[in-house]
Image: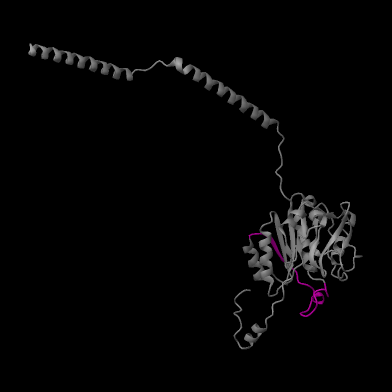
Amino acid sequence: MATRMKLKLKTVFVLYFMVSLLGLVYALMQLGQRCDCSEHDLPKDRTISRLRGELHRLQEQMRNSEATKKPQKPITNPTIFVITPTYARLVQKAELTRLSQTFLHVPQLHWIVVEDSPHKTPLVSDLLVKSGLTYTHLHMPTAKDRKLQENDPSWLKPRGVEQRNEGLRWLREDRRAQPGGDNQQGVVYFADDDNTYSLQIFEEMRSTERVSVWPVGLVGGMKYERPVIEGGKVVRFHTGWRPSRPFPMDMAGFAVSLKLVLANPESCFDGEAPMGFLESSFLQGLVTMDELEPKADNCSKVLVWHTRTEKPKMKREEALQAQGLGSDRAVEV
């Protein structure tokens, strides 16, 4: 009896195992079959088709918009041409280094450096090559009878006359050889190598139409000199010396449009002008007071200073030289 019961249980177990095995085999076979899921994919296909249609429509609108849009010329800033006269002295390299590193921060600037020398010197040539600026290197010696002597006061004779005029000559010849000739946009500024310049002054002058003006600090024995503005026009000048001059301004206090310089080829600085009249000798043939363009917030802000580096005292150097112990002349200062 017990043996028969065991046989029955064994048979049931085998049958259960076989049925389970067949079920597993069937399930595995179904996994490899291709499923007909078209009814599930239909809404998704419709969405994709709609989005594609929308994309094509937007692309067509963009093509039509581009076709009707007028071509725009690229906007470029007028170039500022800075003319700097310079002469050999102990502080020359220091002055030009400081000035060049200011100019590096001014976009669209062309530096015209004119040496008071019968030839270009290696010191200035090397400095300009390493400056990273767009530059032109010129030279023009000052006539002997116009040159300041060692102990002469700086106001006795006008300095930099021949050099500024040489810069103007080169600029006129060079620009006329370029496309556009006399109609080129640009600004001309006379920047001495010993002054101090805010970067803002260059952006102020960039929009000059004829002649723009602004205050200059630490000049003429005053805290500042400046044009006085009423109703947006220059009516007089705040200056401590001969305010009756046609244009009682410092060289650093004005800029001229390139067009105006090119249109007046004879305009230059008069080396024979009386003391304090050098700026007037140049501006009188270009503009009237009523045409001056006030900058620097209606000439209320000082953005350039007439600074001067103190002349170095070389007494100890001279004493050492007398003993044959002077500084190495091969070291460029």
Is residue 40 placed above or below 317 in the rendered structure?
Answer: above
x and y percentages locating residue 175 in the rendered image = 75, 55
Q: Name the residue at 71% across, 42% down.
A: 73
Quadrant in which residue 282 is drawn: bottom right
Percent x, y of residue 12: 17, 13
Q: Quadrant of the N terminus?
A: top left
- Any magenta on residue 55? no
Q: How is the image coloured?
A: one colour
Any part of residue 316 in sight: yes
Q: Quadrant of residue 166?
A: bottom right
Q: Residue furthest right?
A: 244
Look at the image and tell me in which quarter the C terminus lies: bottom right
Location of residue 317 with respect to 108 vertically, above or below: below
Q: Is the magenta region chiefly helix, strand or loop?
A: loop
**Closer-to-camera residue (24/304):** 24
Residue 176 appearing in the image: no
Query: Image check: 272 left or right of 164?
Result: right
Q: Is residue 147 magenta?
A: yes
* Magenta-colored span: 132-157
Residue shown at 8% from the left, 13% from the top: 2
Q: Is residue 103 left or right of residue 288?
A: left
Q: Furthest residue to the front?
A: 2
Residue at 67% across, 84% down: 315
Residue nearest the observer in this picture, 93 or 266 = 93
Q: Is residue 331 left or right of residue 68?
A: left
Q: Position of residue 220 (x, y in %)?
A: 83, 69
18 w.r.t. 140: above or below:
above
